[in-house]
Amino acid sequence: MSLYWQKDLETMPRAELEAYQLKKLKASMVQAARSPFYGKVFREKNINPENLHSIQDITSLPLTTKEDLRGNFPYGFLTVPKNEIVRMHCTSGTTGNPTMIFYNRHDLESWSNLVARCLFAIGAREDDVFQNICGYGLFTGGLGFQDGAEKLGATTIPSAAGNSVRQIMLMRTLGTTVIHTIPSYLTRLYEVFVEQGLDPRRDTKLRLFAIGSEPHTEEQRRRIEEMFGVRAFNSFGMTEMNGPGVAFECECQYGMHVWEDAYIAEILDPDTLEPVPDGEMGELVMTTIDREAMPIIRYRTRDLTRFLPGECPCGRTHRRLDRFAGRTDDMFIIKGCNVFPMQIEKILMRFPEVSTDYQIVLDTVQGVDEMQIKVEFNRDFFTGEREVLETLHHKLRSAVRDEVLVTPKVQIVEPGALPRAEGKAVRVRDLREAKKGA
Ligand code: COA
Ligand code: AMP
Ligand code: ZN
């Protein structure tokens, strides 16, 4: 039996699991108190791990927000000397401080172990060939899956994002059996197969997909499965919680088991911040309990989901999260990159030639997701000269791409041409959803 079917941990009876979590939570709090941020918060609020008597007492601890992470950038959450850090990852965004996460050796070991466990749970084994079609570098999906798949013992192909023709060449040459990528990219990949006169069902050895990093529906999953003749499994992760490997579907394909020996997951009412009754939708709040360099306690993820009731036939006792139903903020995800509309607004407003009205349209065109930014030329600058428009067009495209890593289509329209909203302006129109399940 593989090391990555961690049966004792994954099928631990609930009462035992909760006792285990409580012990790890207390240890994490002791560790967290070594950071400037939690050290101060715990002192000011007189927080002591010894006052926690059950895992439910976690609700007595303060929540941590993205603003806390940004406000204490970069080292305010660090609990170990800097020379113990062996890796950092960070979320995109240069407008506000990005969120940087630091890992020591223990953290990388623990993280890759969790990712290996996820891959094992979907049926990947050491004789698989694993192709990771995902941004490397600062994105966690690159090295995160890389380390996990290596640990599992699969042959790994770190093919990264982009260049679909080469992706197909690699998977055909090396006999790829498992792919990790974002679901929306698979529609594009399929098109390239077709363009080349190939059929992935006939011309590849693909059998498993791990898909995540962006919301998608059950219908999208089924469509992807039919196109490729492959089983696709939902994968949830976030940079603040290491990256991938936080929650993953098992072979039953019904909800994502949160690895509760490494995280404590809560679902709160986003308004009252009180726990919702089991099975009800609310905001996911996460605590790391197996991280040393940068433990995070009760992090408000802004993701809306719920715990699925009942037990999973696979025998794992770790609770399952339902598909994500949206967010409590206005962040959207395009081509696997997280974007806050405010990031784009701040860029646009750096250009005096642009008026204050703009609109972001997200769409799927011939299988490819795209972000279109419609801006109005500022009346005071408008001459209608083509050269001026082209230069502005070019500058806007590069400035947005540098900020969010996605190249937008920019449309500059005449002053007053964008529809005016009654009441609050609708800045983002997302037309992708309707097309995906079709
Ligand atoms: N993963 C893999 N490839 C992707 C992709 C994704 N999420 N999104 C787009 N691509 C491919 C495109 O299909 C295109 O290749 P092709 O023309 O050979 O098919 C190529 O990348 C460039 O795409 P384009 O849309 O022209 O570029 P862009 O400048 O808007 O975006 C990316 C550039 C794709 C490199 C950037 O958006 C990125 O790095 N995305 C990956 C993010 C990611 O992995 N997130 C998960 C993190 S856990
Ligand atoms: P990042 O920190 O860049 O990995 O982004 C994390 C965010 O991506 C999460 O907070 C979610 O909003 C989103 N996300 C990740 N995985 C999924 C998934 N499987 N389904 C829906 N959204 C996801
Ligand atoms: Zn299961």
Image (cartoon, rainbow, N blue to C red):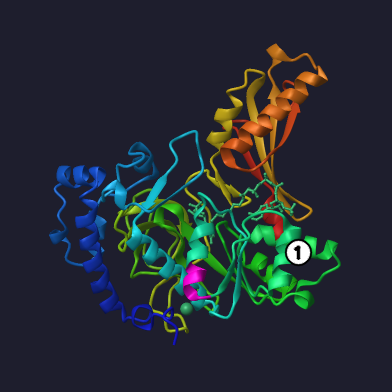
Q: Is the CB of the residue bearing disc 1 within 8 angstroms of ligand 1?
A: no
Of residues 326 and 100, the one nearer the viewer is 100
Give the residue at x 70% y 13%: 381
| Relative image position of residue 59 (x, y in whole percent) | 26, 57
| Relative image position of residue 78 (x, y in whole percent) | 29, 47
- Determine if the magenta segment contains residue 382: no
Q: Is residue 249 left or right of residue 63?
A: right
Residue 282 visible from this viewpoint: yes
* Relative vertical location of residue 113 with respect to residue 335 in this rendering, above or below: below
Give the residue at x 33% y 58%: 287
Q: Is residue 32 left or right of residue 359?
A: left
Q: In the picture, which quadrant includes the N terminus? A: bottom left
Secondary structure beneath dot 1 equals helix
| Relative image position of residue 120 (x, y in whole percent) | 50, 77
Q: Amino acid at mark 1?
A: Tyr
Which range of residues does the magenta coloring cover?
Answer: 148-153
What residue is shown with label 1?
A: 190
Give the residue at x 26% y 43%: 37
Magenta stretch: dominant secondary structure: helix
Q: Residues within 10 Å of mark 1 (few under 14, many from 20)?
A: many
Give the residue at x 34% y 50%: 272
In this view, which residue lies farthest toward the bottom?
1
| Relative image position of residue 269 (x, y in whole percent) | 38, 54
- Count all numbered tags in the image, as a single digit: 1
In this view, which residue lies farthest toward the top?
380
Residue 438 visible from this viewpoint: no
- Determine if the magenta segment contains residue 151: yes
Asked where in the image residue 114 lies, by quadrant, the reply is bottom left
